[in-house]
Every structure is written in C-alpha cells, then in structure tokens.
Amino acid sequence: MNVFISPSSANGTVNAPSSKSCAHRLLICAALSDGVSVVENIGTNDDILATADCLKAMGAAVDINGTTATVKGIGTQDKKQEIQLFCNESGSTLRFLIPLTLVFSEKCCFSGSGRLMSRPQNVYKELFSEKNCTLENMGGTLTASGKLKSGIYKIRGDVSSQFITGLLFTLPLLDGDSEIVLTTPLQSAPYVDITIDALSLFGVTVNKTQNGYFIKGKQKYISRNLSAEGDWSNAAFLDAFNIAGGSVTVTGLNEDSFQGDKIYREFYAKLSNGTPEFDISDCPDLGPILITCAVLKHGALIKGTERLKIKESDRGAAMAQELKKFGVNIEIGNDYIKVPDVIPQKPDSEICCHNDHRIAMSFAVLCSVTGGTLQDAQCVNKSYPDFFTDIKNLGIIYKTI
C-alpha cells in the first residue's frame, strides 16, 4: 500500500493505541497462570497477534474478541515433545518466549519474517550453554532444546532488555532460586520495570539487588482480569503532529506509567530552543520520530543510537537514506546522530519505509508538512494498524495509490 500525503494539519483529540510493550507482557503472564484471565485493550497489531498465536501453540487457550483477550493458562501440563513457533517480525515475541520453551517443551523451533531471524541471540546462546541447554540458528530457523535450570545468570546490562525480560518470565517457574547478575550498567531499564510490574500483577515477585535481580523459584502465576495501558511510544507519533504545526491532544495515557518512552514530552519541549542534546539509550524506539521532529525544528544531537542498527531496519541508516530526498543530510556516528538545522523540502522521489513501522509513521509526520508518497506503508500494522485512519480523522489528507 502506497500512501500519498498532502501538506495538511492535524487538529483534534485522539486516544492512544494500546501499549504493545504492556500487552505482550500481560498476555504472557496470563498464559502462565492457572485459570482464566481477561486482558482488555490489547490492540490487534501484528506483533500482539504473533504472541497470541505462539502462546496457543505452547498450550494456552487464547480467544481474542475485538481488543479483549480471554486466556486460559498453560498450567502444569506435561512438557510437549516439540513445538513450532512463528513469531512473524516480533522481536519481543521471540526473545520473551525462548527461555519459556525450555520449560514447556523438549524442543522448540522458532521462525519469523523480515529481519527477525537475523537479529542477534548470542546472549541466550551463551547463557544456556552454561545450563546444559542449546540454542542453534540453522537456515533461518532457531532451535532451543534442553531443560533450563535455576542458578546464577550473568548478563550484560547494555544488551537488549528483552533478554532480561525473557529470563524474568521463566526463572520464577523453576524449582530453585535464581539470580540475574548484570555485569555492565543496565540500559532500557524502563522496559524491565514494565516486566516486573506485570509480574507483580499476576502474583510473581522479583527483588532488585545491588547488581541485578533475585528471583525465588516455585512461584505461581495467578490469573487476573485487567487492562493494558495506552502506548506512550505510539503517542509520540501523534503528538509529533504538534511539532509539524498542528493542535493534537492525545488521551488514554497513564501519567504514572513505567513506560520509558513517555520522556518524549520532555524531548519535544526542548526542540524549540536551539539545537538540544538527547540520550535515547533507555528509549531507542523514539529514535526515528525524534530525528523527524529535530528536522522540523532546529536540529539536535541524539546520543545512545547504537542499538538502532538492530531493529526492524537499521533505523539510523534508513532515516539518513530517506531524508536525503528531503534535502536533509544527517550525520551518523557510532553512538550518535546529528541532525542539522535545515528546512526540509518536498522529496524528489517516493519514500521507502524499509518495512519498518516507526520509519513509516515518522515520515508520515514529515510528509504532512512537505507532501510526499510513502511506499509499502502497510508496515504500520506491526504496531499501529489504525494509524492512517486516526490521522485522517485529525485532518491529515492522504490517499492510497
């Protein structure tokens, strides 16, 4: 689906979509519980549907009606001999579930789409080898086998927090107590906080230590009825239309949320004053839209960008490639991106979205100022399938071509 966006202004009120980060975690906790849980406001984007399908393959019963999921937990049934899990393009689904399959199956074969199976999993491979488990990638299929044991898990804190979250889901189920020891300072800490909060809602306790986390074994997940929060990450794209000259109010957000991306409001507030400096080490998903907003204002120096390379696309390189079409040349360093103070022009060719939802939504904001065509814009379905409908209702003029 190609989308041509005309210069237009967004005005009005829009409700934030469901938080993908929260919904993933609540669904998994529900699936690990004895009994039946109801999780409302889950959103039906591609990533959440991937998690739901994988949980069903693992033995849970997941019934989605609109934005409400009714989940009957896997419980204490016998381990499956072998399971096949298709994670589509969801890195969260893959990394959250890898350790759990070493509890609920003898062997699990993971597959996916896009760049997913090329994203690094060496952290798990090294950890599991110490626990007599294996993780092998052969021909684009990742195979996990063995029985995970409790104990000490030493892990770098500057790798993706998804590895830590996967362990936090799993270690409470093991027979003995475990400890996660961080060997370097933790990045993306808010995502781990979201996980610990979700676990606590389902009756599972994680204790922070000086260098990581202590997890008592033989814990049980307790079924619950609750609702996922609104998403601060996707709200950043909606709020960015204000940077583009609109007047948009985003509702449905929890001001006390653990979601780290809520810091975008502080970042946006600084963009009108000179050329600010930001660090997105704890909120890398804000990278593309923050670059866009800096282009629309006075530029910025964005630090902590190294992990943008291993997302759905190499996001820094993708933004640089497409921004050239607007007459904007950004500077990419090893762990920073410098956005110049320059006025963007109407693009001289169509914009490639690089099969990346955050790239697509970022350039939708920019094209609302300059005009322009987005190629294969359906990639927004990964996290926000109603994005174009919502911005149309706010007054953004576009047509599919």
Image (cartoon, rainbow, N blue to C red):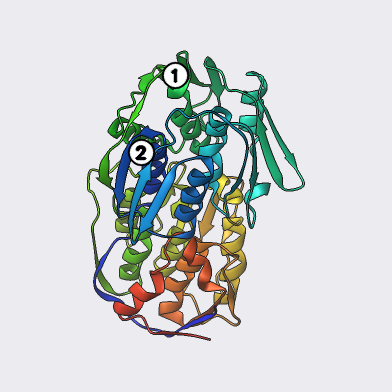
113 left or right of 164?
right
Look at label 1 and name its amino acid.
Answer: Asn
156 versus 224 height, above or below:
above
- Residue ranking furthest to the front: 78
The location of residue 206, given as percent across then percent down, is 36, 23
Q: Is 52 in front, or is 179?
A: 52
Residue occupying the point 54% across, 78% down: 1
282 left or right of 98?
left
Q: Earlier along the polypeptide chain: callout 1 or callout 2?
A: 2
Residue 49 in sight: yes
166 versus 230 height, above or below:
above
Residue named by callout 2: 194
Q: CA distance from mark 1 to mark 2?
A: 18 Å
Residue 160 in sight: no
The location of residue 347, given as percent across then percent down, is 55, 80
Residue named by callout 1: 211
Residue occupying the point 33% across, 68% down: 243
Look at label 2 and name its amino acid.
Answer: Ile
298 left or right of 304?
left
Residue occupying the point 48% across, 75% down: 344
* Crowdedness near tag 2: few (<14), some (14–19) or many (≥20) residues, C-alpha within 10 Å: some
